[in-house]
Structure formats: structure tokens, C-alpha cells
Amino acid sequence: MSVQPLDAVATTPPIAEEARRDVPEFVLSGDRRMWIGGEWVAAASGRTLPNTDPVTEHPLATVPRGDAADVDAAVRAAKKAFTDPSWAEMTPDRRGRILNQIADVIERHAEELATIDSVNMGAPRLITRTMLAEAGEVFRYYAGWPTKLFGTQVPTRGDRLAYTRKEPLGVVGVIWGWNGPMGQLPGKLAPALAAGNTVVLKPAETASLSTLRLAELLASTDLPDGVVNVVTGRGDEAGQALVAHPDVAKIAFTGSTATGKHVQKTATETLKQVTLELGGKSPSVVFADADLERAARGVAAGFLGNAGQACVSTTRIFVQESVRDEFVELLKQAMTTVFTPADSLSSGTVVGPLSTRAQFDRVSSYLELAVEEGANVVTGGTRYGDRGYFIAPTLLDDVTPDMRVVREEIFGPVGALMTFTDVDDAIAKANDTEYGLAASIWTTDLTTAHRMAAAVQAGTVWVNTWGEMSTGNLPFGGYKQSGLGREGGLEVLDAYTQSKAVVVAL
């Protein structure tokens, strides 16, 4: 089967007119400002960047196109706040209370923030609502940690007192993706504040509006001015300036592997610490003994949720040979019923549009490439509708491990199906990638489940489920080219603190 032209019209996704009457005015019009040192400011250059609704293709509010001058102003504000007694001498208990205040305002405004993200970058409101519910829980989890970050007394000779102190790093730069702004930010911002750092946030240029609204909400808490600052702008301008700034002690980054490598290289020039959460080409592995109907729904969710725009998308699908045909039919059924593209604000939508025209064009080029390489399009492979950046959920088979659509991260609603014979074959094929972010295993055999979980080279392994992310207490990160360090859990606090040794002669 050859792919249909990408301008073909399968159907027109309905626009949820009723829901769109409740879209916050904040996202619809006007020129937004950046939040620096407790003040709203335009970019020093006066330039702005457009934002577009990926469902309607209509323009939204613009954001400042910040650059090195704006980043420098934000870093100076954060550096000043770091040593100001209002933050530097704040008791750990009080710092924890402020994190709970942040959780309070997020939870009170969760529907608004979820809607802003859905309109700004296209994630279904079903997904953004979940992200916002988890965001509050992440801040509450880290609100308990400021009173528990302490050093230890170290045994030494009798006339000496030796101990260690856990201290914050200083100014932390945070850069994260457009594919889930309010889902990714809490895992960086909450532990950074819990440890006593100050922060400069640089959201994605095409999805900055929820972060700017969050800054307004933070201003209603007891967080001192300058502790959190927001600079909007392009990655090659504002992002590059933040990574290169000599007064930034650490960069926490989420994005593509290629950009992550550039971030690490730039950060080495000033010996910054870095945490990198990067790309993935994660496997779903379905064994013959699995509950195949449940597995089909889970696998479909794994590569179609948020239109495949998730670093943990399980886009390489491996099915045991003996159940291959049966599983393909079940997967097609799930894809064409439960996972039909629709307006991000519609109730029950799980597959919305791609975030931008550039992302739509990129995924479209991969679909054309798949056919050129010899893949068979089982279902999908076309543009979906004549309005918005929608692509039909697509399943490819007759693919080989060397094809680019199997090797490279597409970041769209595209899955590639292959088969395996036994556990050893499944392990070898699942690990045949430069990435190692996540994996999903489907089996009713406990021995198989635990053997796969141990052998698959991935930072997160789900068994008989997909996409269940911790609300703070589990580490998250990747093996191989999928990143450095971990977010979440206790160990992330080590990434936002440094240890000092003290020896006192008595």
C-alpha cells in the first residue's frame, strides 16, 4: 500500500466551539511580557515571537523575543535574590511552605493552565489536565524536602569536629520542551527551589504562554522577587545565552538529543553542571501470552498519545511472531476508534494536532520517507482534515531495523511494527537503538516480565502499562543517548545541591 498525498482530506476534525468560548483571554490576544526581578518587561530589542493555535491555525498572543541582554538581566536578578536575606536566610520550613503555596495556586488555576497549554501547543485537554494535577503533587512532594536536606558529622580525631553541609548551587537555568510545558517544568523547578536555588526559566518559543501565566500566579505567593524569572525567546538566542552565561551554575534541559549535546558542549566552557532529558525511540514488546486486547490499547496509547509528541513514545513495536496477525487487527481497531484525531479541547480527545507547522512538515517528510524505504502503511499515512496540523494515526510494517523511520525519533503519531521469536530475540531487538529512555513490556509471565525489565536498556520500564509517570518520588531519565542524570525522587536533589566539608580545630 502506498501512502496517500499528505494534502489528502480524510475528514475535517470538529472544532469544539462551546469549549473554545472558555479559552482564557490571556492566550488569545496581546503582547505578553517577561518576568524578571519581580517586574514585567518587554524584550530589550522590542522584538516579539508569534504563537499559533495548531487546531485552527489562528494567531495567539505574542511573546517577547528575548536575547542575551534579557538573559543577563534575568541572571543578575536571580543572582541578587540568591544572596538576599529574604531567600538566603529563609528557614527550610518556610521554603517548604512556599512550595505548598505554589501547589495551591497551580491547583486553583489548573483548568486555566491546562487550557492554555492545549490551545498553545495542541495537547488534548485530557492530557494537560492530568499534567496539571500531577504538577501540584510534584510541588507538594518537594515541599517536604527543605527540612530534610542536611549534612553529617564525620568521625575524626578527638580534637577536631568534621561535618558536611548541603548547600544550593546558585542560579539554575531551566530549558524545556514545547510538548508538555506544565508537565515538564515542575520536575525541574520544584527541586531547584526546595534546595534553595534561584531560577531563570526559558520555555519553548512556541509554547511559552502557560509559563508566563504561572509567573503571574507565583507573584501571588510569598516567593521573593527574583527567585524565579522567565525569559522567552528562541533557543539559539535566549537559550544559548542562558547556557553560556558564566553566572549560571547549572542547566536543567529537556529536548532533542542533538540540542542536548550542544548544551553539554557549551556548558563545559564554564564548567556548569547539567541534567539532560533527551530523545527516545522506545520499544513496546508484546508477548504471545499477553492480554492482547489490553496490549493493543496500551501500545496505541504509547505511540499516539499527544499525537506521538512525547519523548517516552513507544514507537518501535515488537510482537511475538505467533500472534502478529491477530495483534495487528486489534491494534488497527484501537487506532481507528479510540484514537481518532480531534480538537484538543473536545471531551475525550487523546490525539490532537502536531504542535506547529514545522513539526507537521517534519512528520510528513518521514511518512514519505517510510514509503520510499519500502515500508507498508497499514493504516493512516495521510494528513487528517483540511484545517489544523493533524496527521492520521499511522502504523507501518514491513520495516527493517536499518530504516530511518525505525532508527530516528519522528515525534509524531507513527509506529513501526516488527516481530520477534523469543525472549532473547526481544531483548536484542529492543536494545538495538542509540536511545534508552523507556520501554513497555506486555506479558502475563512474571519471569518474562522481570527478565525483560532487568535486561532492557532504558531508564523507565513499564509492565502491562505505559506512560505512568511518578508525581515526584520516582527517578526519571535515560540510558545511552537519552540523557544524563535523573529527575524526580530523592536523587534529583543531589543535582541541585553541593556538599561542603568543614573541619574545626577544637
Image (tube, rainbow, N blue to C red):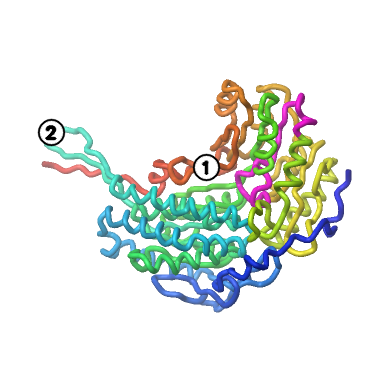
Magenta span contains residue 322: yes
In the orientation shown, which residue stands out farthest toward the right?
1
Residue 257 place in picture, x, y as percent: 61, 48
Amino acid residing under circle 2: Gly
Image height of 207 relative to 442, above or below: below
| Quarter of the figure with residue 416 | top right
Count of number-bearing discs: 2
Image quarter of the C terminus = top left
Of the numbered discs 1 and 2, the one sitting upstream in the chain is 2
Judged from the image, the secondary structure of the residue bearing numbered disc 1 is loop
Indicate the position of residue 383 as horizontal and vertical percent values. Answer: 79, 56
Report crowding for label 2: few under 14, some 14 to 19, many 20 or more residues within 10 A (C-alpha). few
Residue 158: mark: 2
Please report the residue visible at 84 percent of the width from the left and 41 percent of the height from the top: 376
Specify start and end residues of the magenta stretch as a single range. Answer: 302-327
43 inside magenta stretch: no
Cα–Cα span, label 1 and label 2: 43 Å
30 over 246 or under it: above or below: below
Q: Residue at x 61, y 64 (%)?
A: 120
Q: Is residue 266 left or right of residue 502?
A: right
| Residue furthest front in the image | 18
Amino acid type, callout 1: Gly
The residue that mark 1 highlights is 477
In depth, the one of 382 and 363 nearer the eye is 382
Task: Report the front residue among 265 and 139.
Answer: 139
Name above or below for residue 460 compared with residue 233: above
